[in-house]
Amino acid sequence: MRGALAGALLWLAAAPAWGGGPLPVVTTTTDLKALVEAVGGDRVRVTSLAPPLHDPHSVEVKPGALAELRGAALLVRIGLDHEPWLARPLRAVGDPRLLPGGAADLDVSRGIALLETETPRVRAERGVHVHGFGNPHYWLDPENARPMTERIQAALAALAPSDGAAFAANRARFLQGLDAGLARWRSALAPYAGTRVVVAHESWPYFARRFGLTVVAALEPTPGVPPSAAYLAALTARMKAVGVRVIIAEPSTSGSLVAQVAARAEARAVTLIPSVGGDPEARDYLALFDVDVARLVTALAAAPAAPVSR
């Protein structure tokens, strides 16, 4: 955390102060938009370049969002290799402040304890999801909202020093809600600690680690690579062998694929929402976890226990 804070302080030294009015902030995801709004309150105006449900690696930035990017005081991004699509709109805007490492660029992955940093990098030209620098879905561990909002608060305060106290108060209020949420979510999932699950996509290792679940495998043999028939046969056999009874899918997952694997493995599928706004009830960052935890608990409670062969 000290290293992350030191990096933030260096960023502050280079950040120009904003001239007044709500700070125009652009984020790459709706999750970051929700966190910036939680910290910034009515002192920010935030636009997300990506919609709630999308392929994170092939976002088409609309003209209105591109105009917001041109006028942004701050660009907040997930970082790692989560946003390869961002290079094109940044070239179109041509503002060096917004480029990686620029005065208006904020990469909130700094200071996060990343998982799966040894995952082999998939060649980008294959057009698949790449996790070459570690799993980028770190926002799905709610504890990571602490360092993320710390960096956001520091960046906003650098641009609008007169609003620094308001940003600090907003973040403190958000963290109170986060603490209450963590207690609620942990209590709900505590009876299922150690439960083995299969995921459709490798979005959930941070979530699983936080709440005591064990991810046995993914429907994708490598992030973004469609499974072969042989892979699926081996996967369903393994699921039966170790007693996996729940598959975590996402709205973008092939319903027919999930249904096929669930039927063969005698498992129950549940669709979790990976980003704020992906479901009407997931209206903000804390509500996202309320929705996902409730859905998962319902699925785990309904999934029949099965003997595990050893």
Image (cartoon, helix red, strand yellow):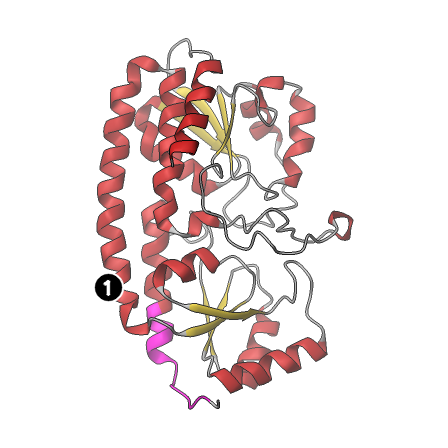
Query: Residue placed at 29% from the left, 25% from the top?
Result: 167
Tag 1: residue type?
Ser
Q: Is residue 143 left or right of residue 127?
A: left
Q: Position of residue 235 (x, y in %)?
A: 60, 78
Residue segment shown in magenta: 297-308
Crowding at dot 1, Cα within 10 Å, few <14 / some 14-19 / many 20+, comes out as few
**Rendering coords of residue 5 (x, y %):** 39, 29
Q: In this view, does 46 lie above or below 299?
A: above
Percent of width and height locating residue 27: 50, 33
Q: Which of 265 and 71 is in front in this view?
A: 265
Q: Residue at 42% across / 62% down in the picture? A: 208
Q: Which residue lies furthest to the front in this view?
A: 2
Q: How many marks?
A: 1
Q: From what the image shows, is residue 41 above or below residue 198?
A: above
Q: What element carries label 1?
A: helix
**Residue 280, relative to residue 309: is it above or below?**
above
- The picture places residue 274, in percent across and down from the top left corner, at 47, 54
Outermost residue on the top side: it is: 19
Q: Find residue 233 and report its image quarter.
A: bottom right
Along the viewing direction, whichever of 52 and 123 lies nearer the viewer = 123
Between 64 and 172, the one nearer to me in the picture: 172
Q: Mark 1 points at which residue?
A: 187
